[in-house]
Image (cartoon, rainbow, N blue to C red):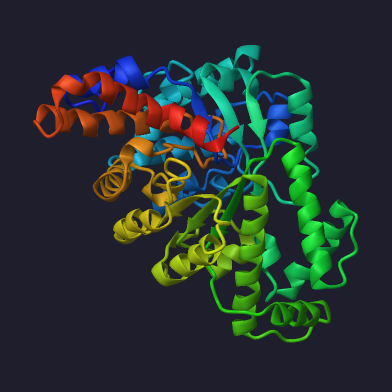
Amino acid sequence: MSFLDDNFLLQTKTAQRLYHEHAKDMPIIDYHCHLSPEAIATDRKFENLTQIWLEGDHYKWRAMRTNGVPERYCTGDAADYDKFEMWARTVPYTMRNPLYHWTHMELKRPFGIGKILKPETAREIYNEASDLLQSDAYSVRNILRKMNVEVICTTDDPIDSLEHHRKIKADNFGIMVLPAFRSDKILAVGSPEVFLPYLRKLEEASGIAIGNFQQLLDALTQRHDFFHEQGCRLSDHGLETIYAADYSNEEIKNIFAKALQQQAITQQEVLKFRSAMLVHMALLDHSRGWTQQFHLGALRNNNTRMMRELGPDTGFDSIGDFDVARPLSKFMDRLDNTNQLTKTILYNLNPSQNELYATMIGNFNDGSTPGKVQFGSAWWFLDQKDGMEKQLNALSNMGLLSRFVGMLTDSRSFLSYPRHEYFRRILCNLIGHDVENGELPASEMEWLGQMVENICYNNAKSYLNL
């Protein structure tokens, strides 16, 4: 084998057969990402490789900083090519980091550039890719077509007008682009400088004055209904851990009243309010038949100085070690007890907790929907070869891999779709090894091929009801 050839990561004949005959050409349902709806609506053409590749990519910024690159070449005012050149200087130092694989896969597909990126090839690769980006064939929409994308679910705040989604739909683009309801900011009750301005925006978006807790729920319900009308079928939450404190409705009303009056709120009151809001949002999702997603375990904004200078989502987050099992069980049991637990996908960021998640989902799968509660794909720091293999193995050992809804990009870059290919190759390699080791029957290749197709595409299409 040679680097990034047709059988990259496929170490057996069975793996190669599974990938090339069953996985490779399946369409992509990217049911969680952070792509810009505006860029899709306007069919943006990026001016150069830096703009499409380095804008907003905190994975690359983090590696560049570690390599000694000054901040002005990451998020600062350096010229586009100078930023790219600093990335090219960093790439050789990323060997054995997934960025090395992703970088070269993203050059090869869709650009067809097979050269190794390093300082000596930087200018040539930059010019070649940037020239291609000037053509209509490499507009945002055509890149998505080229990568065989069928569905995209973006990440959108409840106050969003969804004007770009409406334009995309009106254009009959051919690729389904849907919003997903990300209501994290409504949990910021302990931070009045964030919470109160957000309430004013929610009032404006919903047309409902918010003077008490019921009016808050009414406003969120109005936005939930609006998102549903625009095709939304998923919610998403990015949390350190699930909040599941005991509370009474009267307590929550009083806590919200204190927040409106800018009175001091205790940490215990914050936890009660967050717990109540998660339940209310989950009940809305259940009422509409949506799927709820929980991305759990990130310890965010660790560097106070850089948070102050650059803001969030700039590469200063890490894996956390929060209490997970008891609150997660309590939250889902509270909903399941009244048969109001909707379809749920749980994403874990701490690899030491893979088996915890893989067993937790089995507690609340009730036979109503295949794989109703899912152990979601390895994400963020774990969406690399080792992380994916560990997630797949934990799910296989303690659940049903065959019912898994598969991969997503969780990305802000339109060049990230090779991550689906990466996942599919890793999946086929794992199954291929089992067959050739005699751990799975070679006589069942027809079913194994169907299982691969299901994990890559069919399961998500059926599960999400898009």
Q: Residue furthest left?
A: 438
Q: Residue at x 31, y 15 (%)?
A: 21
Residue 375 vs residue 189, the one in the foreground: 375
Q: Is residue 60 above or below residue 25?
A: below
Residue 142 vs residue 183, the one in the foreground: 183
The quarter of the image holding the N terminus is: top left
Q: Is residue 314 above or below residue 152?
A: below
Is residue 197 at all visible to an observer of this figure?
no
Residue 301 vs residue 200, the one in the foreground: 200
The quarter of the image holding the C terminus is: top right
Q: Position of residue 412 (x, y in %)?
A: 57, 40
Q: Residue at x 78, y 50 (%)?
A: 223
Answer with left or right where residue 452 lies relative to residue 285: left
Residue 357 vs residue 60, the one in the foreground: 357
Q: Position of residue 255 (x, y in %)?
A: 73, 81
Q: Is residue 50 above or below residue 159?
A: above
Q: Residue at x 40, y 24 (%)?
A: 121
Q: Position of residue 424 (x, y in %)?
A: 35, 29
Answer with left or right where residue 456 lies relative to residue 173: left
